[in-house]
Image: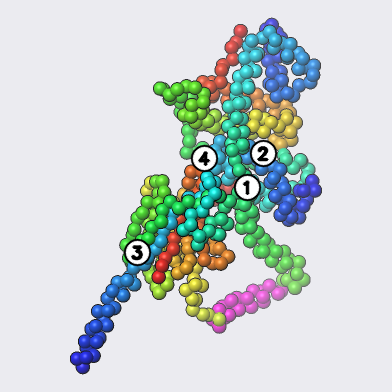
Amino acid sequence: MRKIISLTTFFLILLIPISVAFAQVQTRIRVIEASNVGSSIDPSLRDVQSELKSLSNFTSYRLLKDENLSLSLNRAVDIPVHKGRSLEITLISQRKDMAECRVKIKSEGTDILNTQVRLFSGRTVLIVGPKHGEGLAIIALSARF
Amino acid sequence: MELISRCQQGDPDALKEIFDQYHKKVYRIAYGVVRQREEALDIVQEVFIKLYRSIRNFKGQSKFYTYLYRMAINTAIDHARKMGRSHFSSLDEIEGFQPSDGVEKRPDSILLRKELEERVKTSLEKLPTDQRMALIFREVEGLSYQEMAETMGCSIGTVMSRLHYARKRIQKLLKDYVKEEKRE
Amino acid sequence: MKDSCSVVSRLLEKYFDREMTDEERSLVEAHLLDCQACQDRLRSMEELRDLVKAPVEEAVQNEDFQWIWQKIERGIRLEERHTFWETLQAWLQISPLFQRKVWIPAVAAMTIILLITIPLFFKKTPSLLDQSVIEYVESQTHNVMIYESENKKVTVIWLFEGPAEETPSS
């Protein structure tokens, strides 16, 4: 009986870090500037290169920001993305390999975009636009499980 | 005409050929009205999509370019109306608008150019639609009176009258930038 | 001078726009040699034209239009999705089967019954990957378009300039 109780306690203790880890999701946010200045694509954008090129005929895709965020349930995280704009991301729910997030892009107190997306393993959400100078601003969202 | 009928039958290459032939003209008209690159490009996009949608209705009773130019200028003026709400909206504001003090007044200084462009834009917005069309078609696109009459659906006399009043009004609005006539 | 000035000033715009007969042009050019007022008026018309036209020409020179055609093609592809329904409508109109109006309520009832019962037989729990990526999307300031890449690995939310509300165009 004692053995059973101590083994159970041991496994329960093991589960604590696992559950804490499970309550958080690692998301990757990349801010990209598409323009016709130059003709290169940042190496870290290879996973979305073909989609970026199919969006428009810009010759250059420059990575402005690459951040890994650890999201906890119902806690909004706010990061500046490009001139005068910020992105707010909140983890709404989570399953084995899917995280549902509310994403807002704000500028001067106005919501330019308010969306709820499901981030699956191996899939990326691209938010394209609005215009950024002579080019386009693109935000790539993905999650790791 | 063969190109138009191919386009009406849904030949995608035909629309591309029409685009290659006319996109700069449409852009000139659009930019002439809205005076902003992004807006003008949006207008070009919208015009050719509208054209694709409506080309089956084109019966060939007028020349194709008049059909396209009319579509372009109407689309551009609609855009300008939507944009115009965020810019100067009263004549007082325009007439009180002076080149900035302390800024070098050489015509090629960047700030003065921007102010001038803004002034030209708002002055154009002040013109009645028909006069604005006449001015853009003549001064920007270089259409002849005959071509303008066909595009605008009026007589040559009406074209000349609209052009005359448009020029007169614009000269008044831009009097700080255009030398006044010296009267004997 | 004044009499000829009043005659020529009415013709000056036509002269400026090169819409004159040879005879009229000679008359105007002869007058212009001696009339400063008309010369000044002509000059101010040229300056006005330059103010209106020069920025446009500069913009055209600096613009690369290739990518605009791609956007137009994309817009047209979106338009073409509707034509399937138009084709269906057209087929319904010409089909002899549907010309007898008595068939309509029967077909409608059958369709409704099928629409209710078939999903009950084939209902399956959607896998995670079958679920849509976008739950909802809205913008107060821009138009929004959503599409997926062919391999379904990338979903695009595209923000276009302009107000969110539809406004009628002429």
Name above or below for residue A81 compared with residue B116. Answer: below
Residue located beneath label 1 in the image: C66
Name above or below for residue B62 compared with residue C125. Answer: above
Residues flagged by tags 4 and 1 on a common chain: no
Image quarter in which the N terminus of chain A is found = bottom left
Q: Measured from the top left, where is residue A5 in percent x and y?
A: 22, 88
Kindly report the distance in space between the C-alpha atoms of the residues bearing marks 2 and 1: 15 Å
Report the chain holding disc 1: C
Dot 2 lies on which element?
A: helix
Q: Measured from the top left, where is residue B49 in percent x and y?
A: 64, 50
Residue located beneath label 4 in the image: B83
Q: Residue at x 61, y 43 (%)?
A: C64
Residue located beneath label 2 in the image: B25
Report the chain holding disc 2: B
Kindly report the distance in space between the C-alpha atoms of the residues bearing marks 4 and 1: 26 Å
The answer to whether mark 2 and mark 1 are in CB contact below 8 A is no
Mark 1: amino acid: Gln
Q: Of all residues shown, which one is farthest toward the bottom?
A: A1
Span of residues in magenta: C102-121
Kindly report the distance in space between the C-alpha atoms of the residues bearing marks 3 and 2: 51 Å
Residue depth check, mark 4 versus mark 2: number of the one nearer the observer: 2
